[in-house]
Amino acid sequence: MELSEHLEPSALGVIQSEVERQLLGGPRRYTREQVAEVAGVPLERAQRLWVSMGFAIDANPGAVMFTDGDAAALRALVRFVDGGALEPDAVVAATRALGQSMSRLAEWQVAVLNSRLADQLAAARDHAGTLDEDALRTAVDTLTADMLPVVEALQSYVWRRHLAAATARRAGSVGEETTHRTLVVGFADMVGYTSLTRRIRVDELSALLEEFESRTTAVITQGGGWVIKNVGDEVMFAAEQPSDAARIALALQSAHREGPDLRVGMAFGPVLVRFGDLFGEPVNIAARLTSAARAGTILVGTELAASLDDDDELALRSLRPLRVRGYSRLRAFALRARRRPASS
């Protein structure tokens, strides 16, 4: 149940104001012009950064919507940029990438918070069902005070761990161009996902996606690669070494022998790295190969096949050129593990 269902406006107002006070460093105090002035930032620049983080600006210029925490964050961001830590023309893109990542995380976290708030709301009513707003306010304060330090500490730890892992992957390329790399890009998706969603309940779909994401993430990271993103029934991943990518693909197929079949497509070559995402022809080729692959198979592009040709543990079979969107004759190779001779 959504927390907003069957709640009187007064209860929603109490919850919103108290959560904002705890999360945002105090109540809303400033209009857009005032927060820009307090932060010492031109209004246009402040608005551009605010929108890039994924937040709306009230159409009414006199709307009070910003807090002291917003002003402090704006000052810190501008100081960070002006100090040379980030190129000025990359600020909007960087804040947009950060905002999108945090938005997805927040959507999950608020579901957890809602279930706890529902319990607090029930406790704040008397026997007649009348809401004690002071009791609710105290309960919300206690809940957020208990949860916030733990959640913030966990987020900081996970971020630091990922930062260390990304640094280790790039340890041998200090000083080199960071936005252009040569990588294997792969996609794996569930076959028949669309029709499956019509036949199963929402809770079953949630369990299916959780299982898919858990298995694929474990296989990819254990195999020396990393997950770029999950989009519904599909995972996009990358690896630096072709041999690692090949074994990741084989392990993905092995890990999903029960449940919906997977199809995998991979390509090797130079890509643009932009805020954790990848762009370029290898990405396009890998996506097209995935779409063309049959259930339970792995298709790879020409460059990746050439890099794997000397691996005695892998077998590659050349296929007829594929006619796919953007490519009239796309070369493809089917990849599988080479069968070992039976021991005598």
Image: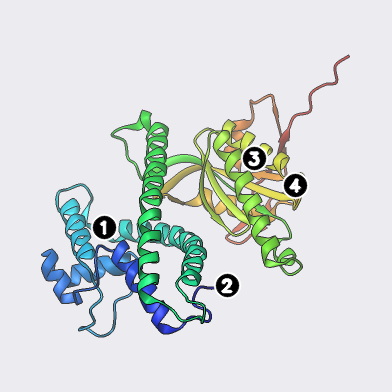
Residue 289 visible in the shown view: no
* Cα distance in 3D space between marks 3 and 1: 36 Å
Between residue 62 and residue 109, name the one nearer to us: 109
Between residue 133 and residue 274, name the one nearer to us: 133
The residue where tag 4 is placed is 296
- Colour setting: rainbow
Q: Amino acid at mark 1?
A: Val
Looking at this view, name the residue that lies furthest to the top. 344
Task: State which quadrant residue 27 falls in.
Answer: bottom left
In the image, taking residue 26 as reference, residue 104 lies left or right, namely right
User: Which residue appears at 33% of the width and 74% of the height?
Assistant: 56
Q: Amino acid at mark 4?
A: Gly
Mark 4: few/some/many CA within 10 Å (<14, 14-19, 20+): some
**149 over 15 or under it: above or below:** above
* Cα distance in 3D space between marks 4 and 1: 42 Å
Residue 78 disc label = none
In the image, taking residue 324 as reference, residue 241 lies left or right, namely left
* Cα distance in 3D space between marks 2 and 3: 39 Å
Q: First in sequence: mark 4 or mark 3?
A: 3
Query: Where is residue 302 shown, x and y percent of the image?
Result: 60, 41
What quarter of the picture does the N terminus occupy?
bottom right
Q: Secondary structure at mark 1?
A: helix
Query: Where is residue 287 shown, x and y percent of the image?
Result: 59, 54
Q: First in sequence: mark 2 or mark 4?
A: 2
The residue where tag 2 is placed is 1
The residue where tag 1 is placed is 91
Residue 249 disc label = 3
* Cα distance in 3D space between marks 4 and 3: 11 Å
